[in-house]
């Protein structure tokens, strides 16, 4: 029996390591060859920081990166604000309304992104033709598209934290003389802060690598000025069509990967610290 259990354990762990290897091996090659001036991954390796130096000299990549970061942060902030308030409002609503909203927020998550992008495009074309009498595609349409994409994900990140929260805390704050706004800011928001932070990071991630909604809803603006907004996803797509992806993209994707690792570690430590604080508070009570 013990031998059979150990065999299953070995097979299970081997399977997990195989999956991790398949997932991270391509990224490892990318990271290694970001420190090489070789034109092709797999070519002769010559250790160099040349790609990182050239990265910040490439104006086209820097403009696309700037647009991507600006749109990601702004759309994530808006989606986090709306999603958090929506989750709190639904949490304190009647059961029938709560079930209806919970069902409605799941549809955009499982729905094909092309459907969301095309429906937004039709709406913007209609508004531009019959309401504004002008082409309205630009930063604002792109922002609305990214917020529409990430808002449901923020909602489902915040909702579990509300369900885990003791509802009597808010009521106790009200009974002790706090206004609803004070109770919300000093009791509810700190309790659900890990979910809000996780929702914000998820919204940033969704915005950073989005291509379909971006390509359907973008127009002129941001760092491109009078030209059409270029993000990293649309920049890479255009480069793929020309079959000339800049080598500097290896350095950029490596920096993005490192940034993601740092963010994940920060969230993990933050959630662990928040959980420990809650345990200490409960122990004192």
Image (spheres, rainbow, N blue to C red):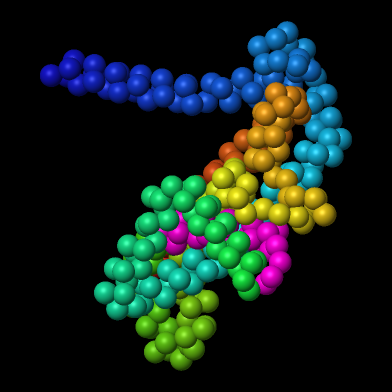
Q: Position of residue 171 (x, y in %)?
A: 37, 83
Residue 134 image point, x, y percent: 71, 66
Is residue 41 left or right of 49 when viewed as pictured? left
Q: Residue at x 62, y 54 (%)?
A: 217
| Residue, far top | 44
**Image location (x, y in percent) of residue 254:** 67, 31
Where 2 sits versus 211, above or below? above
Q: Position of residue 94 (x, y in %)?
A: 29, 78
Quadrant in the rendering for residue 102: bottom left
In the drawing, does residue 55 fall left or right of residue 14?
Answer: right
Q: Residue at x 75, y 50 (%)?
A: 228
Above or below, 157 relative to 241: below
**Secondary structure that dominates the magenta span:** helix
Figure check: 49 above or below 142: above
* Residue drawn at the location 47% of the way across and 85% of the way down: 180
In this view, the residue farthest toward the left is 1
Q: Which residues are magenta?
A: 132-156
158 to the left or right of 145: left
């Amino acid at each position: 029996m013990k031998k059979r259990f150990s065999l299953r354990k070995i097979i299970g762990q081997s399977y997990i390591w195989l999956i991790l290897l398949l997932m991270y091996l391509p990224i490892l090659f990318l990271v290694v060859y970001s420190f090489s001036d070789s034109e092709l991954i797999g070519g002769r390796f010559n250790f160099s920081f040349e790609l990182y130096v050239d990265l910040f000299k490439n104006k086209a990549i820097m403009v696309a990166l700037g647009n991507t970061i600006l749109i990601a942060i702004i759309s994530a902030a808006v989606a986090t604000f709306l999603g958090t308030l929506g989750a709190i409002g639904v949490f304190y609503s009647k059961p029938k309304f709560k079930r209806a909203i919970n069902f409605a927020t799941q549809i955009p998550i499982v729905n094909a992104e092309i459907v969301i992008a095309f429906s937004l495009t039709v709406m913007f074309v209609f508004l531009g033709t019959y309401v504004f009498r002008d082409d309205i595609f630009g930063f604002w349409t792109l922002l609305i598209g990214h917020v529409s994409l990430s808002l449901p994900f923020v909602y489902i990140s915040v909702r579990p934290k509300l369900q885990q929260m003791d509802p009597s805390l808010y009521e106790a704050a009200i009974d002790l003389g706090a206004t609803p706004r004070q109770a919300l800011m000093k009791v509810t928001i700190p309790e659900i802060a890990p979910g809000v932070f996780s929702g914000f990071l998820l919204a940033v991630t969704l915005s950073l690598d989005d291509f379909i909604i971006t390509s359907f809803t973008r127009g002129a603006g941001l760092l491109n000025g009078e030209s059409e907004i270029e993000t990293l996803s649309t920049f890479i797509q255009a480069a793929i069509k020309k079959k000339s992806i800049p080598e500097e993209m290896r350095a950029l994707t490596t920096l993005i990967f490192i940034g993601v690792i740092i963010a994940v570690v920060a969230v993990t430590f933050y959630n662990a610290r928040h959980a420990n604080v809650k345990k200490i508070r409960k122990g004192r009570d």
